[in-house]
Amino acid sequence: MKECVLCKILKGEISSHKVWEDKEFFAFMDINPINPGHVLLVPKKHVEYVFNLPDGEYKKIFEHAKFISSAIQRATKTKRIGIAIEGLSVPHAHIHLVPINNPNDLDPCRARKAEHNELQQMAEKIITQIEKTGA
């Protein structure tokens, strides 16, 4: 079986715009954001589906999602952060954290390819907000 794209990102074989990581999880900008500020949060250990994570890691991924979402919200000045978990297109557990202002803003059909500069600038804004919280 070929290695998944998220494992390749985690190994550095595919570049990404990291916003945060610890020893178990990694958060980076989605290259096809639904809205600017769209971040993916993934466990470093390959597990195919978020609901298959061991209980401790399952709790941690949502704790980290909450923390990162508040930084995204401050950086983008959005009303809310939507969460999407589908587990079909990429067989590696991950959570989409998407800035939203309207009920239909979480629609994946709105995704578009983002430019490198756009992703880098947004990553820097989110990192600044993360650093302000001391994490």
Image (cartoon, grey):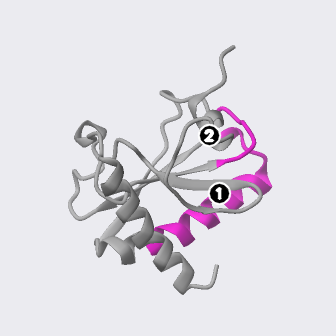
In the visual, does 77 lie left or right of 66? Answer: left
Few, some or many C-alpha atoms within 10 Å of disc 1 (few <14, some 14-19, many ≥20)? many
Q: Is residue 117 above or below residue 101?
A: above
* Amino acid type, label 1: Ile
Nearest to N terminus: mark 1 or mark 2: 1
The residue under label 2 is 93
Q: Position of residue 93 (x, y in %)?
A: 62, 40
Look at the image and give the residue range highlighted in magenta. Answer: 43-71
Residue at 37% across, 64% down: 122
Question: Is residue 15 or residue 108 the one in the foreground?
Answer: 15
Tell me whether circle 1 and circle 2 mark residues in contact (CB < 8 Å).
Answer: yes
Magenta-drawn stretch, dominant element (helix, strand or loop): helix
Question: Is residue 11 or residue 21 the one in the foreground?
Answer: 11
Question: Is residue 43 or residue 12 the one in the foreground?
Answer: 12
Q: Is residue 46 magenta?
A: yes
Few, some or many C-alpha atoms within 10 Å of disc 2 (few <14, some 14-19, many ≥20)? many
